[in-house]
Amino acid sequence: MTTSPRLLLCAAALVLAAPAMSRGQSSFVDAELGYRFVHVSGNEDMYRSQFNEREGLVLSRFSLFAQDPLGGMADRIRIESAGLGAGPAGMLRLEAGKGSAYTLRVRYDRMELFSALPGFANPLLPDGIVPGEHTYDRVRHLLDLNLELMPGRAITPLVGFTYNRLSGPGRTTYDVGGDEFRLREDRTDVESEIRVGAAFHAGAFAGEVTQGWRKNRESADSSLVPGAGAGNNPGTVLGVPVELSDLVRHGTSTTNTPVTRAFVRGDLLPRLRVIGAYTRASVSGDASERENLSGNLVSFELSRFFGGLAETESTQAKNRTWQANGRVELDVAPGIDLTAGYQHRRRELDGFALISELFLDTVNFSGSDPRDLARLIEARTSIDRTDDVFDVDVAARPIDPLTLKANWSHTNEDLTVREDPSEIVVPGSQEGSFSRKVRSFGGGATFSQAGITLGGDVKVDRADDAILRIDFRDRTRLRARAGWHGLNWLNLLLTAQQVDSSNRQDGIGYSGRSRLFGGELEVTPIAPLHLRVGASTDQADSKIFIREPQDFSIDRSLHSENGKSIEAGATLDLSRVTFDADYARLKNSGTFPFTLERLHGRFGWGFSSSLWAYAEWGRDNYRESLASLANLGNYDANRYIFSVRWRQ
Amino acid sequence: MKKSGWVTLAAAGFFGAIASGAPQGAPPPSPPPAAAPTAAACVDCHEDQVKAIGRNQHSRLALAGPKRPAVAGDQICASCHGDTAAHMEASGSTPVERPMAGRVGGDFCLSCHDASHDRASFARSIHQNSATVNCTSCHSVHSSVGAGEHLLARPQAALCATCHQTQASQFRNKPFSHRLETGVVSCVSCHDPHGRPAGRGIRLGRDGELPCLSCHAEKRGPFVFNHVLRGAGDCLSCHQPHGSSNPKMLTRARVDQLCLECHSPINGKTLGAQPPSFHNLLSPRYRNCTVCHVAVHGSNSSPALLK
């Protein structure tokens, strides 16, 4: 577990720059830097898949706000940062500007993505081989920059840049020649986008037009994991052991996407506003791949054994999407608002692939007729989808403690899927034209007076058909909320939500229910002491008919969750001493039972009003109860952080 | 009168009533009264607020905006609260002209804050100003030093959790979730608190896509051989975005169960093909579909999504 030196450099630069920038007329600096120690017993891979807080230096927080900080270059600057250093995620936000000259917003995020699960999609689990075949240890960097020139003027030029890079090693699986083999896969995906445009306001009209150019480049290299040549299948195929001795694959893809966005708002009459928006993106992508492998393999499509495969692929995909929407906002009477809107969305996708395969050293199942065989696959696919949505909202707020809302919407979905014959293994249900209409009605009321808040709403959706089997035909959502904020020392909140979905069509028989109930009580008995306790339940039950592939028998897919969580915490905030403690426990029963306990404590000591020292402890204890997983994912992770905080 | 005549008359009356009515939202801010007490006077009783507002974005009221004149520095309190003379004469026992609380206070905020694209629907948003929730429920007008951008009254995740406690609990207590405590992903990464109710407050990407693809760009494609995305379903067909008890934030604990719920065309009228019979689910080798169908989000090179 190491800490990125570049991130530490960045953190140090922030801390060192703070005094210089904070010399302005009005400034605020808050920085906390510490070192985290980590001790994990049990399955560290599972801990990293879930939390991934690593050992090392971490800039827990950094906030800076200064006016006139840079000698006239900016009249204000705000920097917010958290989590830079020993991960698992860190961010930096910067906003700077000068009067009506410019506003600059920069956002940087760094995410460490780790997944290595013992039981997930792991056919080798019965043999005690963990983690599963699909693992990765990758890092994503996200940069987003937006510059607004002459803010507040009639025309405001806009410039933007976005960069998203995902890279790192991982493991995947390849199904070839009658078995599945574990591969190492190193990939780098880079997406960048440049945008220019302008915002405007002239008289009753205001809006924004931007044009962006997005480019995406992906590169992946795969090779056989050492020792994985025997594959997942311990047996033989037609008495012959299937083995892969070598595999090398290299693939690249590039997409270019011009994106156009436009938005206009017009206050046509004093109580009437009209808003329109248009978005268009046209993606054009090219991909190519080369693969060479050798071994002792079998193909049932060719009815032959083969000793090697050389494959090349060249593909093009185009995706055009556009959507336009308009809405009217009308003040019918004081406190009564009406909004009506219409949206049209269209997506068209066309794909073309040319796949060339050369099977080397093939023999038939009797071991005779040796020859090399070439196969050429040309595939064309397309998807067309159109959505039309009409909606109307009415809100009535004439009597202040009471607000009433009602809404109606109608959605038409049309989908046409054309698959290539090469994709169709079992004919049926893989292409065709589908249509679905969904009508929705809803209403709700909230009341708030004398610290008491009551609210509730209902939403009913009715569909005439399903496109996917898990689409509902009937869905009802009920929500209720009650709160009491009284005497400046008590805050109580109770919430409840229930969603029922179903599709009773023959052969589907889908029904699902999810329920969320929660309650939270916060009490401040004396000024420096704050206590809180909460409890919630999270229940989900669903059932649907499925057809087992091996014998085509009809069965029910049942899934249930029953999570019960309790949380409690206390905060003591004295002039030179702070103490904060939290405990949370989630016990989940049902299809995938487990218990997760989380403990956190933080003690602070102030040497002065500006300089504080903290000691922090966090513990996560995860225990699975599914017999088939044999407790392989269990872990007990303790983190200790010692940090120094400076505020001024 | 012919039917069309009644329609014309009704329409004329309707739009006439609209045109003659009060402007949409709160009236535009007027310059403070000439005799309004200055911030220097307010500071006697409200020292913390006066000092704090000088350090946050509202100190920029001294600059002219697109819809309002510049406010003199010492008139900054009166620019929102109106005439405070009576309030001061009564030593604070009577309210200021405009207390800036509740729905009315929130609607007054909109007299300036309706100018940008993001806030275009604020007046009709999912959190439309009401007595229960309004601008000041989330934004601390006077001070948010240390709480981050947009003058939030509390750190963003804690702020949303004030009302949406069960969703907050899913983020905190589910083993597989987007970890909000890191600050990288937050509620507003995916939800626009000022978004339209019809769009469920979802913050769409720049080209109208689900917000998931803003980070997970490699899943965007387009792919020659598509799976769910861009077809019938979307990310939420298989994943729970807030937090899940199941690995990969899936909606089901077992992969084969998740896949077969669509891929069982028993009545033949839905999209989703039947796996061939050699997929013997009694064998661990076939029980986890993604062992072989690794390119489950889409592929350019394998019709069966094998790579």
Image (cartoon, coloured by chain):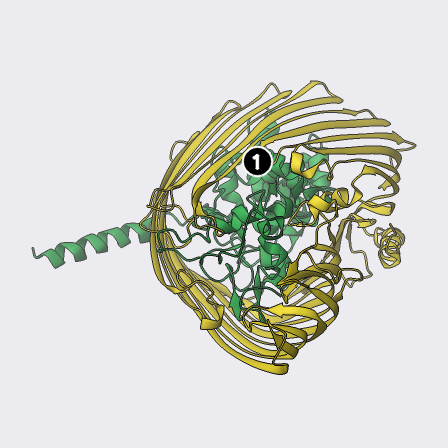
Query: Which of the 4 image quadrants contains residue B245?
Result: top right
- Residue A355 in the image, given as x and y percentages of width and height: 57, 78
Residue A323 drawn above or below residue A33? below
Instruction: Give the chain ID for the yellow colour.
Output: A
The amino acid beneath tag 1 is Thr
Q: Is residue B15 left or right of residue A56?
A: left
| Outermost top residue | A525
Residue A626 drawn above or below residue A552? above
Q: Is residue A322 left or right of residue A61?
A: left
Residue A397 visible from this viewpoint: no
- Colour in which chain B is drawn: green
- Residue A133 in the image, given as x and y percentages of width and height: 70, 54
| Outermost right residue | A607
Q: Is residue B28 left or right of residue B22?
A: right
| Outermost left residue | B1
Residue A585 visible from this viewpoint: yes
